[in-house]
Image (cartoon, grey):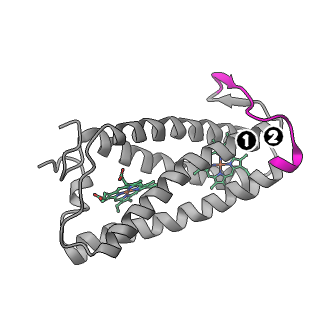
Amino acid sequence: MLGNTVDSWGTVAKLLHWSMALLLLIQLVLGVLAVAWPLSPAKLNLFIWHKSLGLALLLLVSIRLLWRWSNPVPGLPPTIPNWQRQASWVSHLLLYFCLVALPLTGWVMSSASNIPLKVFWLFRLPDITAPDKALAQMMKGVHFGLVVLFVLLLAVHILAALHHYFVRHDGVLERMLPGRER
Ligand code: HEM
Ligand code: HEM
């Protein structure tokens, strides 16, 4: 089943969720490595990988949001208390916010620093702001702040998924796993 139903995620949503989870893990490691690496051609290459993958993730999250809006979203089981429904809604909204804001702030930072934005060494993307040192510095701080927010949200997200599996036994984790469509 490609699309979602009212109580189950479809193949497309699962594929997007898990491929993005894997790529985001790589992206976080690439970002930390690129910043920590001593100045060298390898550092510049790490940044090209980081920026390119970040922009690919922006494309993926756009597809994911369009797919979500054109599909039913599975509801939570009736046993879930109201505050947990609200917490789930807010945390998913914030996760999507980070997934859009991280690449956009990265793109602004790169443009404002006047560094050509090469995508996988294939083509160059246009700058979205004029060179501006103060803006680049500010975006560095915002990008870092978003990284911290994202990692905290992810920790809560993973703990919540494990709570559903080990404590509540309500099938919420299972319905996001491959091959469990009802
Ligand atoms: C989902 C997408 C992204 C994630 C999760 C992410 C994550 C990170 C992380 C973990 C770091 C290292 C910590 C820090 O200093 O902030 C970093 C740094 C950086 N990122 Fe990203 N990033 C993303 C997208 C992008 C994009 C699309 C660009 C540029 C087009 C970009 C440009 C940069 C730059 C230039 C730095 C170095 C900042 C500095 O010098 O402190 N990032 N990013
Ligand atoms: C970078 C990693 C991850 C990101 C960005 C992420 C993001 C999201 C988002 C935004 C949703 C909401 C889907 C929607 O309403 O459209 C979601 C759902 C879900 N995620 Fe993740 N996730 C990640 C990793 C994980 C991991 C590691 C687990 C399991 C341990 C997990 C388990 C789930 C489950 C079970 C759902 C479905 C919740 C439901 O059915 O209501 N996620 N994820």
Q: What kind of residue is marked 2? A: Ala
Q: What kind of residue is marked 1? A: Val
Residue 33 highlighted magenta (yes or no): no
Query: Is residue 37 in view?
Result: no
Q: Residues within 10 Å of mark 2 (few under 14, many from 20)?
A: many
Left/right of residue 126 with respect to residue 13 in the rendered view: right
User: What secondary structure is the magenta-colored segment mainly?
Assistant: loop
The percent coordinates of residue 72 (x first, y second) are 25, 45
Mark 2 falls on what kind of element? helix
In this figure, which residue is indicated by the disc labeled 2? 112
Name the foreground residue: 76 vs 136. 76
Q: Which quadrant holds residue 172? A: bottom left
Q: Which residues are magenta?
A: 121-135
Q: Residue furthest top?
A: 123
The percent coordinates of residue 17 (x first, y second) are 37, 47
In the picture, the disc for residue 82 is none
Quadrant of ligand 2: it is bottom left
Q: Residue furthest bottom?
A: 167
Residue 124 highlighted magenta (yes or no): yes
- Name the residue located 31 percent from the left edge and 70 percent from the top edge: 162
Name the foreground residue: 28 vs 142. 142
